[in-house]
Amino acid sequence: MRVLLVGGGGREHALALGLAGDPAVEALVAAPGNPGIAAVAQLREVTPTDPAAVAALAVEVAADLVVIGPEAPLVAGVADAVRAKGIAVFGPSAEAARLEGSKTFAKDVMTAAGVPTARAYTCEDAAAVARALDDFGAPYVVKDDGLAAGKGVVVTDDRAVAERHAAECGRVVIEEYLSGPEVSLFVVTDGEAAAPLLPAQDFKRVGDGDTGPNTGGMGAYAPLPWAPPDLVDDVMRDVVHPTLAELRRRGTPFAGLLYVGLAITPSGPRVIEFNARFGDPETQVVLALLETPLGGLLHAAATGTLGAHPPLRWRDGAAVTVVVAADGYPAGPRTGDVITGADRAGIIHAGTRRDADGTLRSAGGRVLCGTATGPDLAAARDAAYALVRDVELAGAHHRTDIAAAAVDGRITIPG
């Protein structure tokens, strides 16, 4: 099987490692890729959000499967263009990707499907924003209605901050606050059959103790020792299958990766958001524990044969990833700094570039992450931080508390 992987971030590096490790994948091309991905794939230049260009590249490299990593190409219709060439693609249509591209659309689908989620209002002017904030009270939850690379959400007790974010975004969804620990559940689906992956937890705030602004994610771990034993079964029954059925009813079946972001509230799991692709950095830890060959799994979802795929197999133990961010991230990350100590197993590249002379430099806000497994969560955490400590990047920062509360048994389910 020849695979074309679209994207160039940390998620795509993790996907590339998984695909390259599948004996059925005889050739892997990544576009545009990154220096880390270059170790396991041939790199090609392409604009990931250009449907015609990606489809043409898929034909040129004789791809049997195209895997689309980021959300923007999906919303732009890249999967549709590739499918129109008769090539299997892992990723939903532009219409189905509206689950991530529009918070309002996602809420409409959830309401129609009876999915448990927060009450919400879509607001487009200051008066509507004020009414919604009055209704829900603090903490205020204000979400950009469109794509915002994981940084379009503000959760705050400061009403002025909430109002300012709403004004900056224009069209927003304002929700009631959901209390309880958060969970990320990835579900591989062909639109009918659905296979859940291991639940994970990520860390959105930039600072220790969940302080500071939201980011694209500063670390993650899996599995979740504190999660209710029936969590995945309940979410599949109450969220995933009703959502997939509603999308089929609308004539826009969802095939690809359905990301379910959850809060485990005193009333049970509630959906915070849907995404239409693998989350970053949770992908790094979930795929590190997946024993089932990744290429075959994604190909089954892309070709409507997931129902016949064997049950997923998982490695024992746990995985932790710690993100190293550039100076100034997330507000205004500095780029172009030299990186040393990054060319080692377990280092996932996210925002890097390599000079002609081989020098590795920072090229984004989240630069790289250290991903490690271990027999238990504590061992995996220690190994991940050991990887990060050996990376040198001027002004870089990382959280020091990734997975600490889970290791110490400090996460509880409200009830």
Image (cartoon, rainbow, N blue to C red):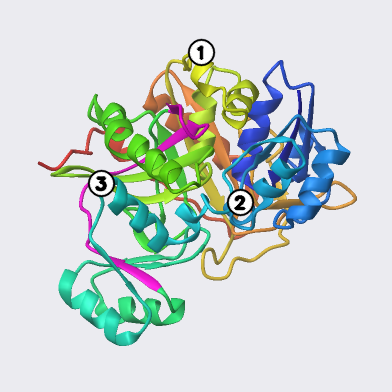
- Dots 3 and 1: beta carbons under 8 Å? no
Looking at numbered disc 2 in the image, what kind of residue is underneath it?
Answer: Leu
Q: CA distance from mark 3 to mark 1?
A: 30 Å
Q: Few, some or many C-alpha atoms within 10 Å of disc 2 (few <14, some 14-19, many ≥20)?
A: many
Q: CA distance from mark 1 to mark 2?
A: 27 Å
Residue at 88%, 40% in the rendered image: 60
The numbered dot on residue 229 is: none
Check whether the beta carbons of the residues at disc 1 and disc 2 lie within 8 A of each other. Answer: no
- In front of the other: 73 or 44: 73
Disc 1, SS: loop
**Residue type (three-letter) at the residue carrying disc 3:** Gly
For label 1, the residue is: 310
Most foreground residue, 191 or 395 = 191
Residue at 55% over, 17% down:
292
Q: Is residue 298 left or right of residue 358?
A: left
- Residue 11 in view, yes or no: yes
Viewer-nearest of discs 2 and 3:
3
Q: Where the N terminus falls, by quadrant?
A: top right
* Residue that badge 2 annotates: 74
| Mark 2: secondary structure | helix
Range of the magenta residues?
172-197
Indicate which label's residue lies in the foreground, 3 or 1: 3
Q: Position of residue 229 (x, y in %)?
A: 24, 24
In the image, which disc is placed on residue 114? 3
* First in residue order: circle 2 vs circle 3: 2
The quarter of the picture where the C terminus appears is: top left
Q: Residues within 10 Å of mark 1 (few under 14, many from 20)?
A: few
Across and down, in percent, residue 232 comes to 31, 29
Identify which amino acid the numbered label 1 is placed on. Pro
